[in-house]
Amino acid sequence: MLLQLNNVFKTFGGIVAINNLSFEVRNNQILGLIGPNGAGKTTVFNCITGIYKPEKGTIYFDGKNITGLKPHVISKLGIARTFQTIRLFPSMSVAENIMAGRHTKCRQTWFDSLIRTPKYFKDEKENWLKIKYYIDLLKLSEYTTSIVSSLPYGLQRKVEIARALASEPKLLILDEPAAGLNNKETQELVDLIYQIKAMGITILLIEHDMDMMMSLAEYIIVMNFGEKIAEGIPSEIQSNPQVIEAYLGSE
Amino acid sequence: MRKNLVWYILFFTIAVIYPHFVDPSWVDIGTTFALYSVVALSQDIVLGKAGMFDMGHATFFGIGAYTAAILNTVYNIPIIYTIPIAIALSALFGIIISWPIIHLRGDYLLVATIGFNIIFYQALQNNLFGLTGGPNGIFGIGAPVIFGINISSQRAIYYFAWFILLITMLIIYNIDKSKLGRAFHYLRESEIAAESFGVNKRFYKVLAFALGAGVASLAGVIFAVQYAAVSPETFNFTQSVLFFTIVIVGGPSSIPGILLGTFVMFVVPQFFREFATARYFVFGIAMILTMILRPQGIWPAKFGKLPKYLTKES
């Protein structure tokens, strides 16, 4: 078990965003999280990554209780993410953006940075070469020095995934990675996600594209109004009357 | 990189021959230009790189100047030994001041730093502990002696100030091209994304203040030596506004931008000295025009300058 949520509860000013949510993610699984808009999916991601602190419940990652830890501490343990609304560093280049993923892997201290010790040179070279690897992996090499805010949406999404991969995570959290992509780009993304799984990385996915979700996810959790209403393999979910009701409304 | 290096060599060559062609008052302006550039570069660590609105940076400049002045005139400590003490003391102050306010955003942080500057100015004015000399300040500060050379002549102080500027530029360059500078930039560009990739927000923000305070303090020591005196109004809130504006007008996180900003905001008004205070029209007009025409600053920072082995196809 890589990730385990036990009875997680989170409110915003009296409104319950997540109510007693429990689920588990196994090693190297692709787990999908679906639900109508406002069901609390992104809030779940923000609780796991430490941006929000759950009021009740516990979250275990890789055998360690990470409930309420700061985002930078959780990141160091091996969780990387992309954001629903892209959050890159807009005025920096593609390579510098991806380098953010190496922040916890760079071993130079601030003092090494300041006066350029031999450790600084070795560390910089090692990590920039890693960046080159991820740039090539995502076929971004012609944009290496481009400023990210000048790139089209689909490429920005790729840079976000590259940045997350560069941190060599155990768990990759993707928040609507196909949003705003065309069919060709979506197909590329599906291939990429399989490639990431083959690297041994566990994937937690929110996606509204149901075709994509049903073909990718090995197991699906369905949320509505902050609660889990169903879970199971894709074929079970597709025929679950509660899920159909949540999406289409009752008659 | 190569092209930039040529420009920097040209810049410092001009600086070296400059005092031989101008009258003494312009040598003084050259010295102050170098020192103000150092302070503006230190302000930029906090404002331009880490993106925090610090409107009280003259405090740290003042801590350096007053530390040197008090240690030298009261305790007879040679100026050269006051430099590390001033840097350490100011950096410590930077940590203590920033720690409780670091989580404040934008304008709230700006108001809090103004508050610290006002407290500092009032402390100097009211002769705190009987050491700061009140509104008149402190006179008779000695000159540093380095390797037996007495840095007391106007030209010697000029070259010393430019040497300090060179060192500062190297440090700033190193920050830019390292994990440290990238972490500052990540925080400025998107705090949530930076934290989600392991950047410890509090550590780096406090460190930006400590480094900025330390470097500003170094300039302060030399400033005290230049005039052999210190007085409170050189370190009041208006001075902080000057340093803040230099960074914004010149180009945040850009070394040439900040040098240019210091030139426009400090040296250019000196050309119009015969117009007395009317010369500050230049100051005001420069600020307004830059913000309208070039909101990124006159010479904005350029990202994407990467190591050769990354950009060249192998």
Image: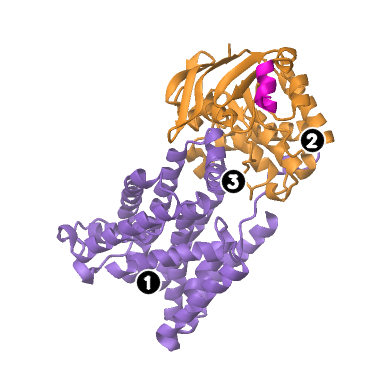
Chain colours: A orange, B purple
Question: Between marks 3 and 1, how big is the CA–CA gap?
Answer: 37 Å
Which residue lies most toward the left here? B130
- Camera-side residue of A160 and A218: A218
Residue under the image location 50 percent in, 79 percent down: B282
Going by the numbered disc 3, the residue's amino acid type is Lys
**Residue located beneath label 1 in the image:** B153
Secondary structure beneath dot 3 equals: loop
Which of the two discs, 3 and 1, sits closer to the camera?
3
Q: For residue B216, say whether it is visible.
A: yes
Secondary structure beneath dot 2 equals: loop
Q: Is residue B137 above or below residue B279?
A: above
Which of the two discs, 2 and 3, sits closer to the camera?
2
Q: Is residue A220 above or below residue A117?
A: above
x and y, in percent, of residue B309 in the image: 73, 40
Residue A116 as seen in the image, left or right of residue B147: right
What is the number of the mark on residue A139? 2
**Residue located beneath label 3 in the image:** B177
| Same chain check for tags 3 and 1 | yes
Judged by its main secondary structure, the magenta piece is helix
The chain to which mark 2 is attached is: A
Q: Which residues are magenta?
A: A241-251
Question: Between marks 2 and 3, how big is the CA–CA gap?
Answer: 25 Å
The chain to which mark 3 is attached is: B
Secondary structure beneath dot 1 equals: loop
Q: Residues within 10 Å of mark 1 (few under 14, many from 20)?
A: few
Going by the numbered disc 2, the residue's amino acid type is Lys
Question: Between marks 1 and 2, how big is the CA–CA gap?
Answer: 61 Å
Which residue lies most toward the front here? A251
Which residue lies most toward the bottom here? B274
